[in-house]
Amino acid sequence: MNNYLENEKIWKLMMKFSIPCIMSLLVSSLYNIVDQIFIGQGIGYLGNGATNVVFPITIIALAVALMCGDGCAAFLSICQGKKDDEKSHVSVGNTIVLVLAISLVFVVILFVFQEQLLAAFGATPNNIVYAREYYTYIVIGIPFFMFGNAMCSVIRADGNPKYSMLATLVGAIINVIFDPIAIFIFGWGMMGAALATIFGQIISAILCYLYLRNSKTFTLKRKSFKLSASVIKEYLPLGISSFLTQISIVVIMIAMNNMLVKYGALSKYGADIPLTVMGIVMKVFQIVISIVVGIAAGAQPIVGYNYGAGKYGRVKQVYKTMMVAQLVVGIIAMFIFEVFPSSIINIFGSESALYNEFAVQSFRIFLCTIVLCCIQKSTSIFLQSLGKPVLSTGLSLLRDFILSVPLVIILPMQFGLEGVLYSAPIADIVSLIAVVLSTRYIFKMMNEEQEQEIKIQYAN
């Protein structure tokens, strides 16, 4: 496995690791998309608005899971490059304990503060009943959801991206099968959509558990599960970028949902249409980001191992290959969103002319610079793979928090409801400057380290 990561052609490695990773993340995104499609057809746009209100809950859970899972995965790859087997199994065992403990505490908090959270996430008098029902059942599945997502990252780093994809895919297929049965045949409405999702998450978590009993590059022992502060301090910061990337989505959605309700009520669209439409736009946007993150996260074991082994030339080559792929994905996505927005929105149910009008406008404005966003997201994960949490975190925070949140709040004051839509393009353009500066700095640093190593070799 080590020789393979160090010597195989980059594009072959990218295909091997990134494609299963993309499929895994796409399937994860489809959990919510499938719910929205069936809810839109069976319940209506108020039901879809309710899923938009509850969506931040799953993102918060995912953020914590990825902080632990991606951090452990990046650390595991670096340890493999350094041939450090002891820290490998301890980091995985500690991750399992952390994720399960945090998920149980999270469930308790979510049930205690249900009404306050729904209000904060933008529930309206028209969709609050649907939101309560969906929320109650989704929360029950949080521990399975978090464990499965964290372990899928670890499994990919263990050199088995196909199994990671399989675990996620099986869960999604179960969700797709049971969604229409629960909604249309049993008539369970929002509860049925949530239960179908939970069932799929449980199966994915079980498959991940089974894999860990026969992993490739580490063997879990009893001492693996004894929390080690020193190991946690080493790997957890590597997942901070993933955490902040997801949490920033929550912060943006809270700010955005409240601005959409406030300024939507003052417009011809009303409060519920903008809230529902932007929920769909954000989830379609997540599909593209899943591909982008899949490419970058799939490359993580390759980058981490070669960086740990001092193969800086291969690290640069991986980044260049990754950027070409991201540009292709971004350009195709931008073309689809600009040319076919009506076709996309119709998948989620046919509504009024005003609803369709705002939907078309939202896709064309909010996602017009998605190419730049693709570059920013993948560069942040690349820096995370190098064990550079400060740079990676800073890049994530800049686009998704420092810029986006104030813009979502300030622009509507001047431009009304349309101001919310322009927040993303402005944030994408400004953050691109930070991407260029960060990559130039990191490549310069690698060049200096490489020159220093050559001098030491000649001296010896």
Image (cartoon, rainbow, N blue to C red):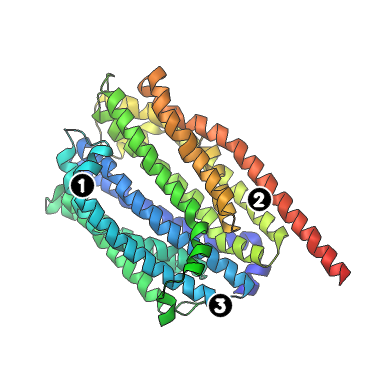
Q: Is residue 458 above or below residue 117?
A: below
**Amino acid type at image mark 1:** Gln
Task: Quote the CA–CA distance across marks 3 and 2.
Answer: 30 Å
Circle 2 SS class = helix
Identify the residue at horizontal 47%, vertical 74% (top origin): 90
Report the residue marked by disc 2: 320
Looking at the rendered image, the quarter that the N terminus falls into is bottom right
Instruction: Give the residue at x 33% y 24%.
Output: 357
Q: Nearer the viewer, residue 437 or 376?
A: 437
Question: Which comes sooner in the sequence, label 3 or label 2?
Answer: 3
Residue type at numbered disc 2? Lys
Hey, which residue is sitting farthest right in the picture? 459
Q: Is residue 194 visible?
A: no
Residue count near mark 1 (Cα–Cα under 10 Å), binned few <14, some 14–19, many ≥20: some
Q: Amino acid at mark 3?
A: Asp
Q: How many marks?
A: 3
Q: Is residue 110 left or right of residue 306?
A: left
Dot 2 crowding, Cα within 10 Å, few <14, some 14–19, many 20+: few
Tag 2 or tag 1, which sits nearer the N-term?
1
Sequence-wise first label, 1 or 3? 3
Q: Nearer the viewer, residue 365 or 90?
A: 90
Instruction: Report which residue position mark 3 lands on.
Output: 85
Q: Which residue is mark 1?
A: 114
Disc 1 element = helix
The CA distance from mark 1 to mark 2 is: 45 Å
Q: Nearer the viewer, mark 1 or mark 2?
A: 1
Q: Nearer the viewer, residue 354 or 84?
A: 84
